[in-house]
Amino acid sequence: MSTPPARLLHFLLPLSLAIILTDAATPPSEADALLAWMSSLGDPPELSTWTNATSLCSKWRGVTCDSSGRVSSLSFRNLGLAGGLDKLDSSAFPALAELDLNGNNLSGSIPASLSRLRSLSKLDLGSNSFDGSIPPQLGDLTGLVELRLYNNNLVGAIPHQLSRLPRIVHFDLGSNYLTNPDSRFSAMPTVQFLSLYLNYLNGSFPVFVLGCRNVTYLDLSQNTFSGPVTDALPARLPGLRHLNLSSNAFSGRIPASLASLTMLQDLRIGANSFTGGVPEFLGSMPELRILELGGCPLGGPLPPVLGRLQKLQRLYVSWAGLVSTLPPEMGNLTSLYFMDLSMNSLSGSLPATFARMRKMREFGISSNRLTGQIPGVLFASWPELISFQVQNNSPTGEIPPEVGKATKLNFLYLFSNNLTGPSRRRSARWSTFSSWIYR
Ligand SMILES: *[C@@H]1O[C@H](CO)[C@@H](O)[C@H](O)[C@H]1NC(C)=O
Ligand SMILES: *[C@@H]1O[C@H](CO)[C@@H](O)[C@H](O)[C@H]1NC(C)=O
Ligand SMILES: *[C@@H]1O[C@H](CO)[C@@H](O)[C@H](O)[C@H]1NC(C)=O
Ligand SMILES: *[C@@H]1O[C@H](CO)[C@@H](O)[C@H](O)[C@H]1NC(C)=O
Ligand SMILES: *[C@@H]1O[C@H](CO)[C@@H](O)[C@H](O)[C@H]1NC(C)=O
Ligand SMILES: *[C@@H]1O[C@H](CO)[C@@H](O)[C@H](O)[C@H]1NC(C)=O
Ligand SMILES: *[C@@H]1O[C@H](CO)[C@@H](O)[C@H](O)[C@H]1NC(C)=O
């Protein structure tokens, strides 16, 4: 007896295969794929130039084509687009090198099908509302050079597949809810910019980072990493220029080996549990522009050698248990415009040499044990001064009349001191401060 169902099967099978094959072989045109996506976003007015009547290569907002007329870049930054990516048919864009949707209000999960964008070198989905986990398939985008997924609501472990992107240079997953990758996450030898700030990463200093030997920018701030920072860091990452480990639970001494990072420009390691004082070697790091050590129980003195940092612009050593006088040598910090040494046990008087810090804009040394007179020359020498906060100390004498020479001064905090005010006659500008408190 012949079996009709089997015959039917023979007949149906090739047909359904054919359907699948044609389906795979003929993706929608690029224009149709974009129109379908636009419609899923509710036809936003920002994309009103997208119509069947015009050429997508010349007239469509945010669309760029290559010389053979295929879409090579889709860039819609900060357009307020809302909706998802699931209706974007990735198979329609074999030549797409750049997808930039930064700063919109796109939500839902990141579709695994983005891995079909096989020419992609830049993917920027930063500053949207994407949630769910990062699809491991993004690791198949072998041409990817820049991956920006920062500032979304992504959860789960960072997929280890991402560490195998062979060309990746810029890797930014900051400000999400991501947890540690598993141990298969390997070193990324091509990465130069590595940012994982503000996530749920924890445990000891991540080993894979030490294998990213081309890194110049490393931001692990605002996680809960703990334990010491390995002495091997500078030897493994010799090109570091920007290092941010702030707001974690790192402990132990600040490694002396950091001294070999001669190109380091920013060292931000505040709000950790580092102890052992402010190391003298910091004064020998010629490129330092930003030094943030505050919020660590360092203790000890403020070393005079810090005055050698000719390029230093920001110094933040607040709440660090410092016990010393203020070294006059710090007056040599002629590039410094921001200094916060508040909440320590610094004593003695404010050195008049500080007048050489001619770029000073924000000067804060409140809640210490300063005595003596406030040198009037500071106000006469700091033309850019905006904020001067010396409250909660014990200086004596008069508020210097030169205060009136700091014409940009907006915040003058001298309360909880024993100063007496200058006569109004001597300083005509008193009434222009927006905030002026001296008792
Ligand atoms: C655009 O035009 C093509 C053919 O020219 C047509 O198949 C398609 O349905 C049109 N799309 C829209 C959204 O009008
Ligand atoms: C973003 O979208 C959400 C809904 O998904 C909406 O509640 C919110 O107002 C939108 N934000 C902006 C800035 O458009
Ligand atoms: C490291 O970066 C340099 C350029 O700064 C580049 O020439 C070199 O190929 C990179 N090495 C790797 C392994 O990517
Ligand atoms: C690290 O975070 C994971 C996931 O949030 C958690 O399960 C684990 O207990 C944490 N480990 C430590 C050492 O805190
Ligand atoms: C960490 O430091 C880097 C380099 O100084 C800086 O660009 C970055 O904004 C900092 N990260 C955060 C979260 O502030
Ligand atoms: C730094 O300042 C001190 C005291 O103010 C001074 O003696 C010294 O010569 C200065 N050093 C440099 C390198 O300018
Ligand atoms: C101010 O002077 C009074 C009396 O001389 C003294 O008791 C007080 O401790 C002084 N306050 C400060 C902040 O120096």
Image (cartoon, rainbow, N blue to C red):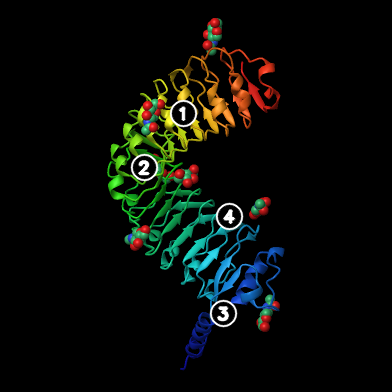
Residue 71 percent across, percent down from the top left? 56, 74
Mark 2 vs mark 1, CA separation in Å:
26 Å
**Mark 3 or 2, closer to the camera:** 3
- The residue indicated by pointer 3 is 69
Residue 55 percent across, percent down from the top left? 65, 78
- Circle 1 packing at 10 Å, graded few (<14), some (14-19), many (20+), is many
Q: Is mark 2 within 8 Å of ligand 4?
A: yes
Q: Is mark 3 within 8 Å of ligand 1?
A: no
In the visual, does 25 lie left or right of 193? right
Which mark, by number, is residue 318? 1
In the visual, does 121 lie left or right of 107? left
Mark 4 vs mark 2, CA separation in Å:
28 Å
Check disc 2 and report its element: helix, strand or loop. Answer: strand
Residue at image location 36% in from the left, 46% down from the top: 263
Mark 3 vs mark 2, CA separation in Å:
50 Å
Of labels 3 and 2, earlier in sequence is 3
Work out whether 429 lies above or below 419. below
* Residue toward you, 220 or 371: 371
- The residue indicated by pointer 2 is 203
- Given the image, on which type of amino acid does mark 3 rest? Gly
Q: Ligand 6 appears in which quadrant? A: top left
Determine contact: label 4, label 2, CB under 8 Å: no
* The C terminus: image quadrant: top right
Of labels 1 and 3, earlier in sequence is 3
- Given the image, on which type of amino acid does mark 2 rest? Gly
